[in-house]
Image: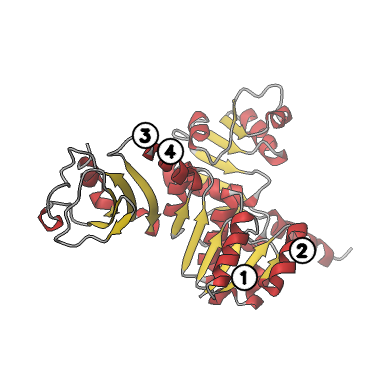
Amino acid sequence: MKIVIFGCSLVGSLLANQLMAKGNEVSIIDQNPNSFKRLDKEFRGKTILGIGIDEEALKNAGIEKAEAFISVTSDDNTNLMAAQLVRGKFNTPKILLRVYDPKRAQAFKELDLNIICPTVDTAEKIETLLAEKT
Amino acid sequence: MYVIIVGGGQVGHSLARMLISEKHEILLVEKDPARYSKLSEELGEQVILGDGTELGTLMDMGVNRADVLVAVTGTDQDNLIICQMAKILYIIPKTIARVNDPNNEEVFQTLGVDATVSATRIIGSLIEEKIDAGMFIPLLALKGGEVEIFQTQLSSDSPLIDKKISKLTLPKDCIIIAALRENQIIIPKGETILKENDTIITLVGKEAKGTFKKLFL
């Protein structure tokens, strides 16, 4: 699969490394050149210095042919804007994003965005573990 | 009117003052504690400390009875999400966003922000105004880009001059709403005759934009 990732954060770089290792074609965008240091030495994908809400950067990353766009910067609003921009302009088949704030995650899920909310997932997981009998 | 302003910087603060002097009810939302402190000295309960994208706790402040929400933080992404949340969660009828990067204006309009203001674009337009008569300068886009307002100066070979307005063939959905001549504002009627060097302000529907622009080539 051709995949564009926005945000070479911990999650972003982990995904980039793993997806690359599984034979996918990966490009990753970040505005901070130092974040690319998180990528494995073996990473053969494209790294684009830029912001994912900029069409030029997205095009350089290959968004027009991409089958998936993943937005995992540390800022919820940036991820939400990038995902909507990509959906509107490029209609990439799979669009996934992370949103920390549960309220925003809930509100935008109603706009049919595939949102992963680690805050809710973590809280649920902890509650499950608390409830387990030791 | 009850107006919520998110972003207590220069623009937000000045806007708050202006609306208060016009007797509107306002709520200014600022997320930086130091700036909030200063603002509350002047505005008291009309300013609150909070993040505009986390409007959850503001329900008590009557957020959902607001008529207009204005997002004027320094960050485009934040302004966009603030306006979207206002529509989704609180059904606020009108949202206005400041857009710092003019390339983002289209996205904002497609995603339902009612009106966008790009200072960069307006200033750019004003600079162009000094360079070329006959160029049409976009001033404002409304209703998701369905309607735009343009400013243009009429050149000596413009098809719009020296004829009564009622005799001009303008495209459908194109209205000349004002003409500026020297220091006078003229609200045109059928009998009005436009002249070379008049600056006209025109309201143009999306469909008519192409035909409208051809009048100035």
- Residue B141: x and y in percent read 38, 53
Q: Are marks 3 and 4 in contact (CB under 8 Å)?
A: yes
* Residue most extreme to the front: B183
Judging by the rendered image, the residue that carries numbered circle 3 is B131
- Picture residue at 55% right of the left edge, 53% below the top: A114
Q: Are marks 1 and 3 in contact (CB under 8 Å)?
A: no
Q: Chain of mark 2?
A: B
Left or right placement of residue A35 versus residue B62 in this view = right
Label 3 crowd (10 A; few <14 / some 14-19 / many >=20): few
Q: State which mark lies toward you, 2 or 3.
A: 3
Q: Secondary structure at mark 3?
A: loop
Spatial CA distance of label 1 from label 3 is: 41 Å
First-in-chain label (4 vs 1): 1
- Three-letter amino acid code at disc 1? Leu
- Residue A105: x and y in percent read 61, 59
- Residue A53: x and y in percent read 54, 41
First-in-chain label (2 vs 3): 2
Q: Are marks 4 and 2 on the same chain?
A: yes
Judging by the rendered image, the residue that carries numbered circle 4 is B127
Q: Chain of mark 1?
A: B
The relative height of residue B129 versus residue B187 in the rendered view (above or below) is: above
Q: Are marks 4 and 1 in contact (CB under 8 Å)?
A: no
Left or right placement of residue B41 versus residue A106 in this view = right
Spatial CA distance of label 3 from label 4 is: 7 Å
